[in-house]
Amino acid sequence: RPRVLSGIQPTAGSFHLGNYLGAVRQWVALQETHDAFYMVVDLHAITVPQDPKELRANTRLAAAQLLAAGLDPERCTLFVQSHVPEHAQLAWVMNCLTGFGEASRMTQFKDKSAKQGADRASVGLFTYPILQVADILLYQANEVPVGEDQRQHIELTRDLAERFNGRFGETFTVPSPYILKETAKIYDLQDPSIKMSKSASTPKGLINLLDEPKTTAKKVKSAVTDTDTVIRFDPENKPGVSNLLSIYSTLTGAGIAELEEKYAGKGYGALKTDLAEVMVEFVSPFRERTQQYLDDPETLDSILAKGAEKARAVAAETLSRTYEMVGFLPAK
Ligand code: AQP
């Protein structure tokens, strides 16, 4: 079976619709066909300041949401990144292989550090993509299911894997991004020119999966569209409507053309009312299942402990081979 690896940050509490449609939904599907490793990336979370208590609670909350979304610990390996120390260890080796200029070109760092003020951004935020390289290479992943915003980091992973293999000998699998066109980028409901994101979106533009279903319905109904009335998939000229159609289509399995036909001659109101209903039907059981996992932290922690054990077996082997290739003297 080919292998997949991906991760999600525990920082925001609730996952948002972009996280789910862009990434987690694919994770659930891929556990059927792939040897799948999924993790809650708490090491990445501390690249920006975190409250320790909240970080711990949000890490459990992220794992509970992944299980609620449909990850099955019998079918995939689900773990917390800091439970597998090899991530930080391989990241150091990868840091030493990366050019400063090369790391400086990562657009996510540029965007995020610009928001924080360049002097306040941590070195961790700067090297975040290189930790991500280590995350992926440790598991010899063939594919990495992510949203479009991560494409550049997967490119860096490919470059560094090839560089390492070229310099020290064949060690790492060179991975490919797994990005579904339809859901590669879910847009903000109030400003469809930007991606839906926990840091850039306004509360009204961001669908948090754990919001009250009532709130979710309200946000969908007040989504920004355009002054035209035609319901047509045309991301360039009608980004708001197209975003709603993508979301609707993915959540229900109805094709875009089918939806265009269904709503021909009807107003935006009808589309939004129906989509609000679809969203409520999706988020209500998701919220309940998440709560069930949170109510039983012992079971949750034991799932994560088993996951970490399985992950470490693979990670330790790759790290030990990497150390050998680099020329570190083995400890007796
Ligand atoms: N709007 C989106 N559309 C499609 N995919 C998205 N992803 C995030 N936003 C969208 C994908 O979700 C996965 C997990 O991402 P993350 O752990 O990096 O989450 P994040 O970066 O904290 O999410 P945000 O909201 O994008 O955070 P900020 O505002 O900090 O940048 C990834 O696969 C990502 O591609």
Image (cartoon, rainbow, N blue to C red):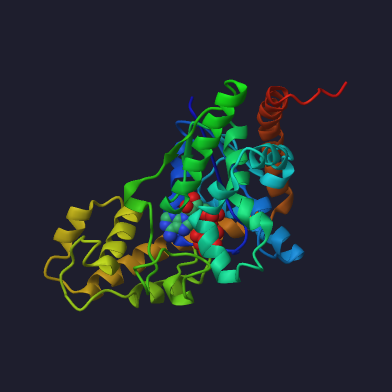
**Frontmost residue, 128 versus 40:** 128
- Which image quarter is the C terminus in? top right
Say left or right for 91 vs 256.
right
Is 169 drawn above or below residue 46 in the view shown? above
Query: Could you tell me residue 104's position as x and y percent?
Result: 55, 53
State the residue lying farthest toward the right.
332
Q: Is residue 45 visible?
A: yes
Say left or right for 125 vs 231.
right
Quarter of the figure with residue 205: bottom left
Is 171 drawn above or below residue 127 in the view shown? above
Say left or right for 255 vs 186.
left
Quarter of the figure with residue 225: bottom left
Say left or right for 50 vs 214.
right
Query: Could you tell me residue 65's position as x and y percent?
Result: 57, 54
Query: Could you tell me residue 82's position as x and y percent?
Result: 72, 46
- Residue at the image position 68 percent from the left and 57 percent from the top: 123
Q: Looking at the image, how many numbered discs can be counted on the residues? A: 0
Q: Is residue 294 visible?
A: no
- Residue at the image position 54 percent from the left and 47 percent from the top: 102
Is 330 drawn above or below residue 5 in the view shown? above
- Residue at the image position 62 percent from the left and 37 percent from the top: 97
**Frontmost residue, 17 versus 100:** 100
Query: Could you tell me residue 55's position as x and y percent?
Result: 70, 61
